[in-house]
Amino acid sequence: MPPSSFLFIGRMREKSSPQNSQKDRRKTPSPEIRSFPMKFPMFSLHLSPRHLGAALIVLLCAPAALPQTSPSASSMQKVEAHNAQILEQHLQVARKAMAAHQDSVAAQQYRIFLADALGELAIARAQAGQYSQAAENFDAALALAPNSPALLVEYARSEFQAGNLPHAKSLAQQIIQQYPHNKNALVRAYSILGRTQLAQQDAKAARKNLALAVALKPNFPNGYNLAAACLALEDQKCAAKIFSDMQASYGNTAVLHMYFGQAYLNSDFQRLAIAEFEKAIALNPKLPGAHYSLAAAYLATQQSIDKAEDELRKEIAVDPQSALAYAGLGHLETGQQKLSEALTDLQRAAALDPQNPNVTLYLGQLYAAMHKTPEAIDALRRAIAGMPNSPQNKSQLQKAHYLLGRLLAQSGQTSAGQKELQIAQAMMQQDITRSRQQLASYYDQNSATAPANSSSTAALPQEKTRHTITKEQQAAAQAATQFQQHIASAVANSYNNLGALAGAQGDALGALADFEGAAAWDPAMPGLDENIGRAAFAAGQFSQAVDPLTRYMQHHPEDKSLRAALGISLYMTGDYAKAAAALEPVALPNPVSNQVAYVYAVCLLKTGKPQPALALLKSLALQLPRSEDVHRTLGEAWAATGNQHQAAQELGIALLLDPNDAAAYANLGRVQLAQGDTAKAIASLRSAEKLDAANSQIHYDLAQAYRKASQPQQAAREMQQYHHLQSKSAAQPD
């Protein structure tokens, strides 16, 4: 049954920003890694306190996070207004093209709008740390604009930030392979690929790709990441040379030495970090994060805990809102049995940064040392729940599970405690290669509440990870949600109109995908159930057609065309009772089509109503005398009413019309078996078997015929084949 014309309904509200890219056809240079010195372009460095003072719990060999310089609010507003103008232009062109029946132009403009809007939303979601939602939006945008290097770059960066390293690597490699002459995309792809390989412990490959990024664009981030790769390969001279070139370009600033110190702190050259942080403090004693970072370096290099505590107090004096400094100080105080002071400092840290799971872990350890078991258990559980199972957190997670297990066991919760201890043991046995983590064990293996001695090395809490929701990310999430709400109507209508255009071109599957895209954005859009139902029916996706057509018929029971489509869809999915109920108004007394009448008759027969089915099929046989389907089904109806002679006659006609109809042979064999003519039954069933050997029911019926003919060996063979096919069918997934 052909579908009716496709419908598109709805007004459009839109606002978004496109992601356009320009290809640079210049040949990519092949850099020599040792071709230093590098000249870095001059620009101001801005170091956010959020990125300072990296803890010792860091991704192995990974560079420190680089802060991004944010444009001013006024410039962002100008960009947003410009982007909204561009998108409005695409929609205006699309609407005019549709009115002029220029379908290809309209479809192109709708796709551009959707790709730009969804790409912008994906970037906003990534900025908010909502990486899974961002991935969905990136996939949708790229489905509409698969040849967009800008989208691929943003997607790769988002996946890297999300920690989905294999996918980030794959996307970066795809960009490099597909856009070798697009310099802007290429340099970003090399950078992302190198940073990903660095995070994957493949420093050699990382160094090669980061060098390519530097050759294409010798800016600070690329050079800094290359230096981190050099340090991961234990090539300190390479990193020092890059840092020297940077200092020559940017000048001798405190911020720059902070970056250098971070790189050294995250490497095997941690003692060099002390000198860099001291230089930073000498140049700017009030630089937020400098004293904290120096404290971390002291602890990483087995320096005096007193020196670290002194630096942390200096950090608090510089920045009284530093949750990291309070947490680090409280952690050290716990290790020295200064429990009252530790409680004050850790509670202050928790108040300043309630989302940091390391702070919660330290509170749990402190409560355990204070013999406050219920509070300790609660804190440890919250720390585990909030701490991602990532490489940089393995040591902390292992401690949390171990201590929680001991406390649960001591409080009588033996089973729960054993489970936590098993998790801790499994994590302890995992191989973490080339670990640079130097963390104190505050609780030895014999006592869950005995703190380590004061000479132990201690770690400071980690700065916010990619999984920690910051205030900035909360604001970004709110902005992304508002943006999504703002474009929802325009996106839904654009998808709906694309579906209508695809349907007009006969692309039912494409139309279905577009209509489903509209439903994802506005499931209550008027006319959408009809559109999805029509497209799914036309595409032969009958199970997908049932629900929207059912909803549509509840409000439009008079629509005979879609009632027929619903009934046939239910029939095709095997729901014969509902199909019969849906089709009855359009099958009796005057069927809207012979197809509808036939399907209705089959449904009656399938639901145990052979008499009304027989009457309808006899009428159809007169109208369609050369339809083998009608004659075969009429034969089934005669057999169901007990008239085997008429059944055999109709089935014989069906086989004359189509000698390769396995179902007709099988039905005829059953009729002949009921008539007692086993020889003819066996012959008919064997013909059916040859035409449809995978039909288990035919083998079963043939086995019964052989039994009645006193041929037990043949009967056993057919039953064996029947059971084999049944087992095979049961083993297959639905």
Image: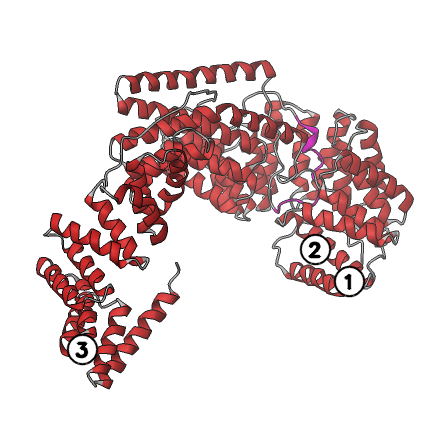
Q: Which one is earlier in the sequence, the residue at label 2 or at label 1?
A: 2
Q: Up-down: is 187 above or below 713?
A: above
Query: Looking at the rendered structure, which numbered label has been put on residue 53?
Result: none
Tell me the quarter of the image containing the C terminus.
Answer: bottom left
Would you say residue 676 sits in the magenta stretch? no
Q: Which one is earlier in the sequence, the residue at label 2 or at label 3?
A: 2
Tell me the quarter of the image containing the N terminus.
Answer: top left
From which residue to which does the magenta span run? 47-60
Looking at this rendering, what residue extends furthest in the left direction? 656
Residue at x 25% of width, y 78% of height: 704
The residue to which callout 1 is attached is 413
Query: Do we see residue 258 in this rendering?
Result: no
Viewer-proximal residue among 76 and 633: 633
The residue to which callout 3 is attached is 676
The image shows residue 713 at horizontal and vertical percentages of 24, 85
Please, what is the three-letter code of the amino acid marked with disc 3?
Gly
**Spatial CA span between label 2 and label 1:** 19 Å
408 with respect to 215 (left or right):
right
The residue to which callout 2 is attached is 398
Of marks 3 and 1, the one in the foreground? 3
Of marks 2 and 1, the one in the foreground? 1
